[in-house]
Amino acid sequence: MSFEPMRPEQIVRVRGLSKRYQIFARPADRIRQLLSVSSRKRYTEFWALKDVEFDVYRGETVGVVGKNGSGKSTLLEIICGTLTPTEGEVAVAGPISALLELGAGFNPEFTGRENVYLNGSILGKSRLEIDKKLPEILDFAGIGSHVDQAVKTYSSGMFVRLAFAVAINMDPELLIVDEALAVGDIRFQRKCYRKFDELKAEGKTIMFVTHSTELVRAHCDRAIFLDSGVVKSVGEPRKVVHEYLNLLFNPAAADQQDGNAALDAPEDVAAIEAATDEYGLRLDTSRDYCVRRKGYNTSEHRWGDGRAKITDYMIRSAGEDDVLVIQQGETVEIFMRVAFDAHMSELIYGLTVKTVDGITLFGANTRAREQQVFSSEPGSTTTVGFTFKAGLLPGDYFISLGVAVDDDEVDNNAVDRRYDLIHVHVDGPGKDFGVVDLELDITEHASSATVIEQERA
C-alpha cells in the first residue's frame, strides 16, 4: 500500500490507521496460541482503532475528545511511535515531545534532575543543550529541592509538573499531551494552558486529549471526536464538541435529531400573533416560537429524547420584553414554556451562561439546588422562570436552557436541551476588562509621610 508524500504544511498525516489487540480469556490460552500450529483462534479480536484518517497542520492546536476506551490514548501513542499500528500509516514531520501516561519515560530510581537529562537524551538533545534548558525547566516545574530526590517519592502532582516542564522546553515541533494534566492542581493547569498559548504564538503544533470540552473550545483550532476507535467528526471545535455531547449524554437521540434544526416554525401571521400569557409566552405549544424571538440563535445546538419540548422563551429586563441588549448590572428574567408529551417525575430545569468561545461563566439547575419540581402529565405545560443579575462586562454572551430527567438508567438524561439558544449583548461603560463585573472599588490610602511630602511640595 503506497501513500502520497506529505505536503509542507502537514506535520501529522494519518491514513487507514487501525490497531488490533488479541484478548485472551486465560493466560494459558496465550501460550497455547503461540505454540499451536492449527488455525484455531484462542482469542477474541478488539480493534482499538479502525480506519482512522486525518491531518494535523503546522501551528494548529488540535483537541481529541471521546469517551473512555474510545482509542484516544492509543492514537497518541502510535503518533509518538511507542505503539505499532496493525494497519495503515502515520507520518510525522519534525521532532515530537510527549506527555502521555503518568510516569512514562521516567526511571523511578533516578532523581528528578537525572530524569531531565534522561528524557532530554531520548529526545535527541545533547547534555550541553539540556544544561542550557535546565533553569527554565526547574523554574516552570517549581518543585524546589525535590528535583534532587528520587522521583518514586514524588506525588502525582510533582511528577506531572516535572514531566510537563521537560516536554515543553525541548523545542518540539509537535507537543502531544494526554490526560496527564488532569492530575495537576488547578493553578498549575492554568499555567500549562497559558504555555500552550505561548507555544501557539511561536508556531508550534499541539495535540492533546481531554475530557474538558470547554478547554477544547477555548484553546483548539480543530477537534477530533473518536468513538469506539472510529473517527466520528473532525473540524471546528464547537461543532465537534456538540456531536460528542450528543453521544455522551443522549446516544439514542444523537442519531435521530438534527441538533441545529428548529421545530416546525410558524409561517403565517395569525400563528405568530397567537395569544400570550402574563409572561409574554405563546399559549400555543404546537409550534416552536423560540425561533421568532429577537435574540434567537440560529446556530443553537439542540438535542433530547423529545418527551418534552421548550416551545417558547421570554427574556425581560428594565421593564422591556424580548430584549436584545441588557444593561450591565441590570436584573434579568428569563421564562421558558415547556410542553410535555409523557408522564415524567424527577425533572430538572437548568440554565447556563457562556462566552462566545464557549467558556461557561455560570450554570445552575433545580436538582443541584435541591428544589422541588412538579411531575408532568401528557398534554400539560409548565412555565419556568430564571432571575439573575447581569454581572457581566460589555460583550456578547449565549444563554442555554434545558429540561432533563433522572431515571433508573441515565443520570440527568436530556429531554430537551437547547445549547446557545439565546444570544444577548451586555452594554455598559466598558472601562474594565475581562467578562465578569465584580463591582470593584479602587481606593488609595496615602501614608502620612506621603501627605507631608505633598504639602511641602
Image (cartoon, grey):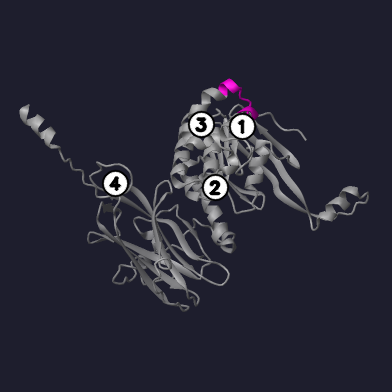
Name the amino acid, label 2.
Answer: Thr
Separation of marks 1 and 2 at Cα, in angstroms: 24 Å
Name the residue beneath numbered marker 4.
394
Q: Which is more toward the observer, 265 or 416? A: 416
Give the mark, 2 or 3, whose residue is nearer the N terminus.
3
Magenta range is: 119-129
Name the residue beneath numbered marker 1.
119
Q: Residues within 10 Å of mark 1 (few under 14, many from 20)?
A: many
Give the mark, 1 or 3, whose residue is nearer the N terminus.
1
Q: Which is more toward the observer, 214 or 139? A: 139
Name the amino acid, label 4.
Answer: Pro
The secondary structure that dominates the magenta segment is helix
Instruction: Please tell me the numbered disc located at residue 15.
Output: none
Give the mark, 1 or 2, whose residue is nearer the N terminus.
1
Whether residue 125 appears in magenta in the rendering, the answer is yes
Name the amino acid, label 3.
Answer: Ile
Name the residue beneath numbered marker 2.
210
Q: Residues within 10 Å of mark 3 (few under 14, many from 20)?
A: many
User: Of tags 3 and 4, which is closer to the observer?
Assistant: 3
Instruction: Please tell me the numbered disc located at residue 137.
Output: 3
- Quadrant where the N terminus sits is top right
Marks 2 and 4 close (CB-CB < 8 Å): no
Separation of marks 4 and 1 at Cα, in angstroms: 47 Å
